[in-house]
Amino acid sequence: MTSFTVRTARWSARHPWRAIVGWLVFVVLCLGIGSAVGTHSAMTADYRVGEAGRAEAMAAEGHLERRSAEQVLISSRSGSLDRSAAQAAAQDLTARTERLPEVADVARPLLSEDHRILRVEVALKGEERDAKDKVDALLEQTEAVGKAYPRLLLEETGSPSISKGVDQQRSHDLALSERITLPVTLVTLFVVFGSVTMAGVPLLLALSSIAAAVGLSMVASHLSPDAGVGTNVILMIGLAVGVDYTLFYLKREREERTRSAGRLSPEALVELAAATSGRAVVISGLAVVASTATLYLASDVIFSSLATGTIVVVLVAVASSLTALPALLVKLGHRAERKARRRAERGKPPRRTRDDSGGRVWTALLRPASRHPLATLCVSVLALLALVTPLTGLKITEMSRDTHSRDIPAMRVYDRLNRAFPDQRVTHQVVVRADAARSGEVVGALRELARRADADPLFAGASPVRTSADHRISVLELKVPYLGNSDQAYDSLDHLRKDYLPATVGRIGGAEFGVSGDVARYTDYPAHQNGKLPLVLGALLLVTFAMTAYAFRSVVLALIGVVLNLLSAAAALGLLVLVFQGTWAEGLLDFHSTGSIGSRVPLFLFVILFGLSMDYQVFVVSRIREAVLAGESTRQAVLGGIRRSASVVTSAAVVMTTVFASFVFLHIIEMKQIGFVLAVAVLLDAFIVRILVLPSAMLLLGETSWWPSRAAGRAADVPAQVADGRTVADVR
């Protein structure tokens, strides 16, 4: 791998303009091809899991699937409702919408019990997931009728308009995130390098990597459909790792330039950086890719979409650091040499370079680990375990429509709809498939089920039984007068599945049956995920162990890496539970607590954090291993390596934390939780694990850290010779 990174850097260094232009052409091609093929979005069938998914598939087979519907509420702008005017507006709306090609049918208007709101339900054609793209025409007609009846207020809500509002809010939030992260990242890099030009290089490469990854993800969506979250994760992960990888490379090149005191050419310096930090970047990137790939084992379209976006942007970021970055560094290096010559010709002293060997601050921070490693290890681990404690109260739920921000207009109308028509809040869809000859028996059993549910206060009536044209599939819809995220709604599903169905439809031999609907989805998805969790986590631990053992030729370090990653991830998740399951931080972080954590957050955290933690693990331990290979004792190598890498690890942590923390300002609760937990996890990993726990453990283990290899004697692992004939060890 070292020879590969050196050969790639050498070519880029010797042909800088070809490399730079080639990279720009690659980015443009990715965007062009991606735009040409478009994005293949996930369909409704791709989201089906558990019993709810099987029931939806059976209903779709009989063309009895649930259709997307919009609800138009007609009320008075002031005073009581003029029912004749409202009926006229409803008729006008019905006539207009029935002519739309997107509309399947329009139901008769329904008046609320308090006679204040008239409701018109409009069913849309086609896929449930596509409905949000068809709702604009309906919204236009609703607005037109509202203008024709100025004394009436016409408002629209429903899954399509809510989904459209969520997408618009997500776009606004991402723009806000960019306005926060880009300036802070640029300032951080300027502080690190003291140069606007050098600070702009990591940001420029990260943004170009994101652009290329967006195009490639469009192509990849035709193999693994996009669930609408791919761009989000590309922006979040791409900016973080793109800047980090470039930062690692840049800092090493500057360090070698300072150490060589002008004896090495820019090309040689680039090769040195490629042989050390370049290798670390490749290993780190492959570790992120390998760990993220375990998300595919979850058999979930959203996790697959997250994995695809992460893998694509990480690979592109690694490619940019191996090709475009060396070329840019050579051009900037020659420019710096020309400036130095001009300064010398004018009789000015050369500019002073910063000492990155580790200052007093990092020496002080490392003092507890260096002087009292056992005590430091125990205290640090106990502190992290204390943060893990809130995990005992972890409650995982599927974040439903009821958890969306009320800044979305359709959500405010949705609340009015639920208050005015409480018996229409939730619908359970019971689906039965049996031989056509038993159709009458199935219909009778479903009617018996409806009678039993009618006597249960958890239900509020049933629809007539619908049967497919071939008489094989029948559907019964049951209304529940409670919100979808309420305990009563979940209790009604339990009664239905455990009591009423087995006692009615369950007695028909050979019949397949199931319950679908929003509440069933919210129940079955976490159960499906929990079933996949052992497989994903097992694969994740195995991949992390294998990658670390390969990178450092050490089983001991691989075990330490797995344990530390588990500890920091669990501690971050414990903090997430402490903050988001309670109400004390609602005002501070601008959210409304659901008393639970989004079902996708914990698994996504573990997988992504295991990959990102390899950034610091590989970079820090690589510096330590280099020193050991150069003849230093493990103690000297640990303390010196961490001091030398401290500034770049800190800078990388600040950038990552800024990127992730910006997502806390988003309105979508799951994105808030993901941003918060990743930001906290990075801080814990960078400042507790890598500064206190890791050095303490390695100091206590000493030479055992490298078992089964003898690191000091593995001369073959020293990077190959650079262009001027000297090795990294020689330059030291």
Image (cartoon, helix red, strand yellow):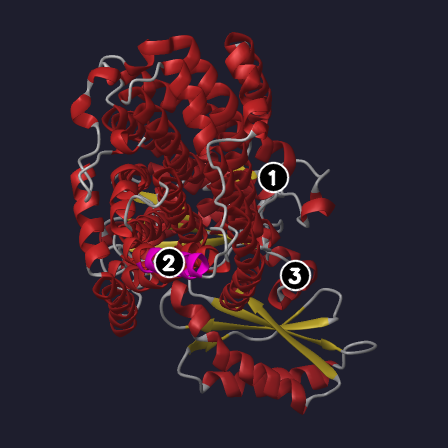
The image shows residue 115 at horizontal and vertical percentages of 74, 70
Local SS, label 3: loop
- From the viewer's side, name the closer residue of 386 and 723: 723
Query: Dot 1, how many residues are within 10 Å of its Cα: few (below 14), some (14-19), or many (20+)?
Result: few
Residue at x 25%, y 58% (from the top left corner): 220
What range of the chain is rendered magenta? 331-345
The residue that disc 3 covers is 421
Say if the magenta span includes residue 690: no
The residue that disc 1 covers is 487
3D distance between C-alphas at marks 1 and 2: 49 Å
The residue that disc 2 covers is 205
3D distance between C-alphas at marks 2 and 3: 54 Å
The image shows residue 498 at horizontal and vertical percentages of 45, 34
Q: Are marks 2 and 3 in contact (CB under 8 Å)?
A: no
Q: Quadrant of residue 24?
A: bottom left
Name of the residue lying farthest toward the right: 79
Please say if 700 is above or below 126. Answer: above
Residue at x 55%, y 26% (from the top left corner): 391
Q: Are marks 1 and 3 in contact (CB under 8 Å)?
A: no
Residue at x 72%, y 75% (from the top left corner): 75
Q: Is residue 621 left or right of residue 455?
A: left
Query: Dot 2, how many residues are within 10 Å of its Cα: few (below 14), some (14-19), or many (20+)?
Result: many
Query: Dot 3, how many residues are within 10 Å of its Cα: few (below 14), some (14-19), or many (20+)?
Result: some
Q: Amino acid at mark 1?
A: Asp
| Quarter of the rendering occupied by the C terminus | top left
Local SS, label 1: helix
* Residue 466 visible within the image: no
